Amino acid sequence: MSIQQTATAPAIAQTQTNQKIMTSTSDTYKTVGRNIIPNPKFSTRNVNVFYGDKQAIFDTSLDIGNNEVVALIGPSGCGKSTFLRSLNRMNDTIPICRVTGEFTLDGEDIYAKTMDPVLLRARVGMVFQKANPFPKSIYDNVAYGPRIHGLASNNAELDEIVITSLEKAGLFKEVKDRLNAPGTGLSGGQQQRLCIARTIAVSPEVILMDEPASALDPIATAIIEELIDELRENFTIVIVTHSMQQAARVSQRTAYFHLGKLIEVGKTSQIFTNPRCELTENYITGKFG
Amino acid sequence: MHNETPLKGHISKRFDHELEDIRNRVLTMGGLVETQVNNGLKALLESDSATAKIVAESDYAINSLEVEIDERCVQILARRQPTAGDLRLVVAIIKTITDLERIGDQAEKLGIFELELIDEGASSSQFVKLEHLGTLVSNILHNALDAFARMNAEDALLTIAMDSKIDGEYEALQRQLITHMMEDPRNIRNTLRVSWCARALERIGDHATNICEYVVYLVQGRDVRHTDYASLTQTNDD
């Protein structure tokens, strides 16, 4: 396994002289900051993703720690969603998409031939930008995953899973009297929390979130963000967001992507007050790249 | 590469303009404060009652600028949610103007005490020579404002080092003033006034040092407050 070196030491030396690091535009580059950490939950090395001839991700290595929220930020088309989708093999469904590199979840290769993508996606769940409840009842939406994976041996156990999941997603109080009503009848924010409940019903280890609150109003967004903070106790979360303030609020580490390259990774507190790369600084302060 | 935190280049030109505007207002405030301090010194050293009166009555302009800049910074925080260099600029400005306002208060004291000394028919030069302390303080303030205007952390660090000379000079003056008080207790009232002037000058040095610390934070993102000078030049770790 080739481990990419982090560029921490020169980064410190450069900030001492007030100079931001300019990232080379060539294909070889080094991610600035700690992209590699000890004892990661999820580990990716030298990831390249292609859509046909077009390369969407370049030689990216990023570790995700246990029970941490990692935010992936960057301008549209920078590859953050592509990277997120490669973490539970969602890109497998795109015929022209080709993924190379190492992806390990607790040391296990998720792209191994023996790995069943359906079981992988139960371990690495996903919440999408637009809430997508099944055209079923609230109860059945949450019970769907546990049923197909055989997680409950009887109805009482299934009830227990549904209720606990709805509670964890902060939705149970609002829907407890209408569990048989259609999930599509809920408000946008409630639908999104229903999708989160459906995701956590199968007890995943990692939850991937792709713009989970971008279609929601500030109150529903705040509820989702509060939920993310609570979910962190039991799950590892990777979130893609266009809202820098959201990344700053919910994450412990932030990774900045630019044109398919992972430019900088660091503690969120550092990235938003004193990023080391000029590209990162320009993006988060709203300047031209 | 850039050695300054650029205020320009935001996609929102209006944001560029807002940041440039608060920075310019701080420079204006710095100019007013510097004039007040230099006039205060002139009044003190030359027993110039006209200048002393101007100094004693001009602080309001500095105070109103402080309030105005504060309000503009609050608006930027609320409406722009600045990050990284922009955030550090706004935070540094909020803190800088507090110190500038206090320097203004100290300068005002110079004018007021000088007017009292003139009323008593006395002069600071009867007791001690304040010229040297005055020059040191005037220089440190000038350098601090210059480091802020050019956002130059190296100059800010060099300026911080100047404060120890001021402290030394202030201690020496205190010893001389105490000697005067012991020699003739009738001098105590006026000697105290001179002592308060020296104290005001020494405090101006401290505030100038604070401003330099904010400049280092603004440019380099590191907090060097309450750090001894030797460790300031060392590299910090993550």
Image (cartoon, coloured by chain):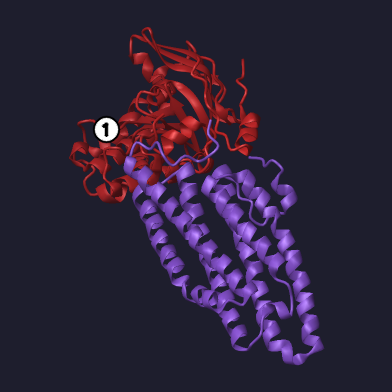
Depth check, front residue: B57 or A11: B57
**Chain A as rendered: colour:** red
Q: Residue furthest top?
A: A53
Q: Is residue B182 above or below residue A203?
A: below
In the shown orientation, is residue A237 left or right of residue B131? left
Q: Secondary structure at mark 1?
A: loop
The three-letter amino acid code for the residue at tag 1 is Lys
Query: Where does the image place residue B181, in percent across and percent down from the top left?
Result: 77, 86
Q: Is residue A159 visible?
A: no
Q: Residue at x 56, y 50 (%)?
A: B146
In the shown orientation, is residue B11 left or right of residue B169? left
Query: Where does the image place residue A67, in percent across and percent down from the top left?
Result: 51, 38
Which chain is represented by purple in the image? B
Q: Is residue B102 above or below residue B220?
A: below
Query: Where does the image place residue B219, in percent across and percent down from the top left?
Result: 55, 44
Q: Residue furthest bottom?
A: B186
Residue ID for mark 1: A130
In the shown orientation, is residue A76 left or right of residue B4? left
Q: Chain of mark 1?
A: A
Q: Residue at x 21, y 41 (%)?
A: A180
Residue A186: image quadrant is top left
Query: Where does the image place residue A243, in percent across and percent down from the top left?
Result: 36, 39
Q: Is residue B46 visible?
A: yes
Q: Residue at x 61, y 32 (%)?
A: A11
